[in-house]
Image (cartoon, rainbow, N blue to C red):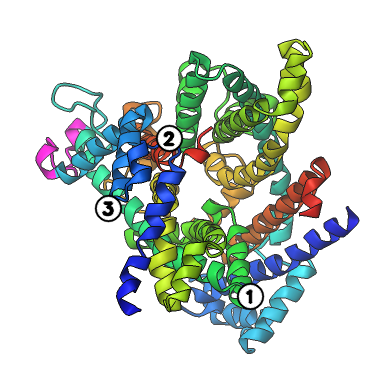
Amino acid sequence: MWRYLAKRLLLAVPVLFGVSVVVFAAIRLIPGDPAQIMAGQAATQEVVEEIRRSLGLDQPLPVQYLYFLRNVLRGDLGRSLFNGAPVVEELGQRFPRTVRLALASMAVATLIGIPAGIAAATHRLSWVDTLVMVLALVGVSIPVFWLGLNLILVFSVRLGWLPAFGYETWRHLVLPSVTLGTASAAVIARMTRSSMLEVLGQDYVRTARAKGLPERAVVYRHALRNALIPVVTILGLQLGTLLSGAVLTETVFAWPGIGRLLVDAVLARDYPVIQGTVLLIAATFVALNVAVDVLYALLDPRIRYA
Amino acid sequence: MPSSTPESGMPSPRADLPARNGPAPPALLERPRPVWSAGVVVWRQLRRSRSAHLGLGILTTFALCGLLAPVLAPYDPYASDLERSLRPPSREHWLGTDELGRDILSRILYGARLSMGIGTIAVGIGVVLGVPIGLFSGYFGGWVDLVAQRVVDVLLAFPSTVLAILMVVILGVGLQNVMIAVGVVSVPTYARLVRAQVLSLKEQAFVEAARALGAGTGRILFRHLLPNTVAVLIVQTTLQVGSAILSAAALGFLGLGVQQPTAEWGAMLSTARQYIQLAPHTLVFPGLAILLTVLGFNLFGDGLRDALDPRLRL
């Protein structure tokens, strides 16, 4: 197990390296002088020169990259062009809020997706199955931001039950997490259903039935445990998707997380913030994928020998 | 020797497809038919699938709406009339008017043209870049595979929306750049998919036979391996166009895609958002159009998958 863990962690290193190269290159691929871009259009010549020096932009590209990497590893992601605040501080403040939203959405997605998938599989080809599958298809087809706006329209504007903006209490969390969790719930339901159907067709399930176990025990004690193994992988990957979807959901609900920060930074051309946010999101994404693989290996020992 | 080469390309789809379709009529298995008979089998399967029917129906409707927009649209989608702004649906304006008094129905019809176009071209870009990467990566293995897969890994390290936004940061906003950004996001999917197919296909007897007959690498790749990945590619592409339309609309909504005043569904929602209390109808219809179009692609894609490869159906 430890060897597998070490191997998987080691594999993540070149990916993270690649991510840093892409983010580094992105800012330099924008037409124009990077120092001028980083400084903003209104900056004076001295400020531009100062940025050029501090970022080492007068050096050859590989040297620049090393400077960039050194700064990132030291936790220095530069300062926002607009309020001059260190990007790391801004991210530190906002990241927990995005994590809170993602976890709440994950809870929504799991609590809806898994039971729906089980119900569809155990009532195969009945109206329950059809209903779950149709809803799941709608769930993956609906634009996240439009769903959010509709929920605001119904539950905030019309009924006045829940707030549309703000992030302090659990009531603020309801609409955003339902919005963000819907697509994942749909994916999880589909996955649970197909995994469950596969397991229910296996010999050991027939044996369990043959020895007279009640259907309930067969489904929940025997089949479900194995059926959930692939679902766990999907859960982990969905958590990454949720981070991605947070960009839209946070914009709709004015949720002050890193997704909204990214959009605002892009609209304002605040390049240090864009750079830092994208790096953080990608690093989290990679870490999640490693965690999923390791968890998968823990749950299913066959994986490690493959 | 060379005269037999053209035929060596044929057995692959023929030998492969009836077996994959499992309960194919016995006649198909006994007597060799022209290649397109596989298409007939698929078509029969498709006609049985209710979801494929529904999906195709929705897609045809929206495609026709897009193509015939200039004929069907009751108004000029860009003609504003401030006296008639934010009117709810009525007999003159079936879906109401927006903040500038433009007819929403007309804008949605023109938007269909735009969204279908963006989705198709974006996915085309993804296919053109991703499929060769997958082919070479899977066939040659070794360092080609290593390099290609690390590039794919890095692209996959970014959540799709974030990657699309990063592309927009580099390229700038606008119609053309949205298509490129959304297309690039789908490259890893195709590279992975085709690679996996090629890895299993290249060990099969028909590839060995082709090689024994003296077929060159290019011929093996494009005449023998590629045609065998087409079934999977078609399914993936159908589903991918749906998600490309979603991504493009999302960029439009964020103000990072197609810009106002263009009648693009996402951009329309971006403005409608400000009138959520005053005129909810401006919000409802463009979103419904996105939902239905994407649903159409997903329904049809699911139906196609069932028809093309029953092993995947559960």
Secondary structure type for disc 2: loop
Does the magenta portion include A95?
no
- Indicate the quadrant containing the N terminus of chain B: top left, top right, bottom left or bottom right: bottom left
Secondary structure found at label 1: helix
Q: Amino acid at mark 3?
A: Pro
Query: In this picture, which residue range is highlighted in magenta?
Result: B70-84
Q: Residue A8, percent across and down?
A: 78, 59
Mark 3: few/some/many CA within 10 Å (<14, 14-19, 20+)? few
Q: Is residue A226 above or below residue A4?
A: above
Task: Look at the picture and state if A251 lies above or below B201.
Answer: above
Q: Label 2 sits on what residue type? A: Pro
Give me the residue at 79% from left, 42% from top: A300
**Quadrant showing the C terminus of chain B:** top right
Against A44, residue A180 (above or below) is above
* A2 up-or-down from A155: above or below: below
Say which label, 2 or 1, has the lower sequence index. Answer: 2
Residue topped by disc 2 = B23
* Residue corresponding to mark 3: B34
Which residue is outermost to the right? A2
Measured in 3D between alpha carbons, the distance from the residue under mark 2 to the one under mark 3, in whole angstroms, is: 19 Å
The one nearer the camera, B297 or A273, is: B297
Q: Residue at x 50, y 19 (%)?
A: A125
Left or right: residue B65 compared with residue A294: left
Magenta region, main secondary structure: loop
- In which chain is the residue bearing label 3? B
Q: Using the rendered view, name the quadrant where residue B57 is placed.
A: top left
The residue pinned by badge 1 equals B142
